[in-house]
Amino acid sequence: MNPIYAALGTTIFTTMSGLATELGAINLGQGFPETDGFPEVRADAARAVMADSNQYAPMKGTAALRDAVAGFYGRTQGLSLDPAREVLITSGATEALAAALFALISPGDEVIVFEPMYDAYAPLIERAGGVVVRIRLSPPDWRFTEGQLTAAFSPRTKAVLLTTPNNPTTRLISREHWALLARFCAQHQAYVISDEVWEQVVFDGVRHVGVLNVPELTGLGVKIGSAGKIFALTGWKVGFVCASEALVTQIAKAHQFLTFATPPMLQTAVAFGLNLPDARFSDAVAELQRSRDLLMAGLEAEGFCTLPAEGTYFLNIDLPESGIALSATDFALRAVREVGVATIPLEAFCASGGLPLPVVRLCFAKSDATLQRGIEALKRAR
Ligand code: GLN
């Protein structure tokens, strides 16, 4: 048995959703919308499954979807991508991450990450033979500093793996922080594998700046996107990799032996969806922002201290600032067992043995009624 997996438990998302089901709790843990997104995109998938071929799609993705991805990022982020050479379709962003790491990392290479981080990263880096080098970020600003980068980069640094907008901190990397990081990456010729699955879920008119928007990182950046997040259809598992032709060619070699191809009818529907008018996407974000505000106001009114929520489906509660003297895990267990609300403790996004991080994450991609019930219940967990 491989020791990396032998030492691992089950992901917190599965554990917490399991507990929520078992205990009949309100599930504000795992990040998924309570109701399915974009009905017109679902209808197109249903049509395609009967009208079109259900055999293997092209290994790098259908031409229609690669064109649509390039067009979408051209319109929304000012990128100029060659769909035939600089876009690869994968079976979800997690597969894209695995393919990028397997293709770019060799045994002994160091990969810098920012903790707290999504729980899939470290096992994937280690399974690719890489060494995880952690930079620890702290609330409420969750920003890295030049001093931390200086300490983390070494002659063995091969890549930086980051998320913007960040899950779980919700913060976006600003242009200034991109510029700072780019200086180090350019000097070390380190790749930046940038998980941007939340790029469309950004609030308060702030603009997402992704790795391919940073000119100093030309040829080093790998941008990963997700249809599941863009259309609030997290079960679809359709991801995109955008990078230079040289990098896409390498990453496609890993992808061909991971999943080979992605279901064609979902690719057809995602292509249709990406071509919808801009207003359709801004309406979806406005709705989520309203849910964020509802949960934030409700929790604050009950004496909880929430952290700034710039993007993603998530709102974080700072426990000490809320007057709660429990670890995040203990609070999350109390909340699910005693008052029936599932949350995610941010400790789950950190290496075991790390510093305590008494913050819990709540998913607000839910109906108003569910959020109200969650607030009512959580006030009894204080
Ligand atoms: N991305 C989701 C979250 O952060 C979880 C996805 C999963 O369960 N693997 O909650």
Image (cartoon, rainbow, N blue to C red):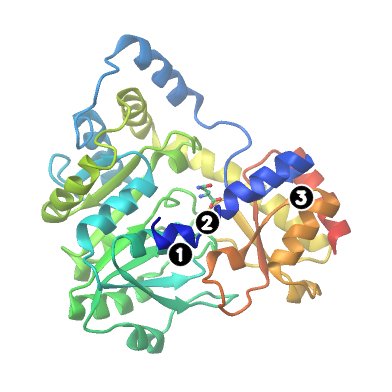
Among all residues in the image, which is located at the extreme right?
380
Residue beneath disc 2: 311
Separation of residues labelled 2 and 3 (CA atoms): 22 Å
Amino acid beneath label 3: Val
Residue 228 appears in the rendering: yes
Among all residues in the image, which is located at the extreme top?
51
Residue 143 at what x, y percent from top left?
48, 76
Among all residues in the image, which is located at the extreme front?
1
Question: Residue 150 or 25: which is nearer the viewer?
Answer: 25
- Which mark, by number, is residue 172? 1
Residue 363 at what x, y percent from top left?
63, 50
Question: Residue 212 or 153: which is nearer the viewer?
Answer: 153
Up the image or down, 367 lies above or below 322; here it is above
Residue for point 44% across, 72% down: 114
Up the image or down, 369 lies above or below 109; here it is above
- Which mark, by number, is residue 341? 3
